[in-house]
Amino acid sequence: MAAVVLAAGCGVDETVVARVDGVEVDVERVQDYLEKVTGNQWADVDSRVASRLLDQFLEQEAAVMALKSEPEEVSTDAVERSVVLLRFVEEVCGPPPTVTPAEIADAVAIRMADIVPEQVLIRQLLLRGLVEAQEARARFDQGEEFTDLSRELSIAPNAESGGAIGWVVRGTQPEHIESEIFSLDVGRVSQPIEGPAGYHLFQVLEVRASGKVSKAVAEAEALRDLESAGSSEHLSRCVDKAVKQAGVVVFEKHLWFEYRGRFAED
């Protein structure tokens, strides 16, 4: 039975862009969500980004349905919706699978065999606009704690935890980001860097020169990465289950952009 359908929208009000479990999703809620996530006017958001964010929005709506809540009870704020999504996973799907010792040992062996490029341990603030980012950096320069600014100002999903990202390896990020973060001294904060979701401020916490990693570092990183991957896979499977149970109908003709998301026809 097909649980995901792309509909032409016949007989449906043109302000309705989708249905999740029979509940209509109004275009204004989706547009508001896009603006809050990207910091741009909804009409200016690239079609690929808009497609991805619409999928994200609808997946979150399906998770809300699984919690037996009305979607209107959850705001269009990205952080609040992420919190609801995490609660859904905890309550409906339970904890992710435990990483086994064998998996850790295999990952450690791979890490210790490689020469690792230069790395920096970073955290971030994500602000909607350039002025907000400049003001946040000025407050840091005046002595405010980065973690406090993150909890107060950042729109990133990890804002409450202080914006921690982890280790970034040289050669894995866009050149304009790497040129900034790898030039920073430990403790310093970057200039605002524009991204698809807003303006980033990065703080370098530690620098690791290129070379082989120690066993202790390899074990810690292997465990962190395996747990992170396991949690992501667990979240994806859990959300997919909610989407299939709810049923998602997208009215493509009511969208203002060319939709190429997960619910599009093949």
Image (spheres, rainbow, N blue to C red):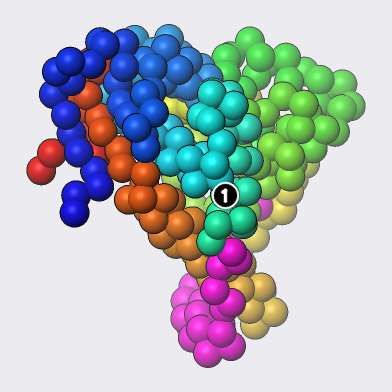
The residue most toward the right is: 143
Residue 181 appears in view: no
In the depicted structure, whether residue 241 falls above or below residue 220: above
Q: Which of 76 and 140 is in front in this view?
A: 76
Q: Which of 55 and 62 is in front in this view?
A: 62
Residue 139 appears in view: yes
Q: Which residue is drawn at 16% across and 29% down?
A: 7
In the depicted structure, whether residue 113 falls above or below residue 142: below
Callout 1 environment at 10 Å: few (<14), some (14 to 19), or many (20+)?
many
- Which residue type does callout 1 highlight? Phe
Q: Is residue 100 magenta?
A: yes
Q: Which of 153 and 51 is in front in this view?
A: 51
Q: In which quarter of the image is the N terminus?
A: bottom left
Q: Does the magenta stretch include residue 11?
A: no
Give the side of residue 70 with respect to residue 188, left or right. Answer: left
Q: Which residue is drawn at 20% across and 38% down?
A: 5
In the depicted structure, whether residue 252 falls above or below residue 114: above
Give the side of residue 176 with respect to residue 14, left or right. Answer: right
Residue 210 image offset from top left, x and y in percent: 56, 64
Residue 78 image offset from top left, x and y in percent: 56, 30
Q: Which of 21 and 52 is in front in this view?
A: 21
Residue 97 image offset from top left, x and y in percent: 54, 74
On the image, which quarter does residue 127 sit in?
A: top right
Q: In which quarter of the image is the C terminus?
A: top left
Q: Name the residue under label 1.
A: 88
Query: What range of the chain is rendered magenta?
Result: 94-121
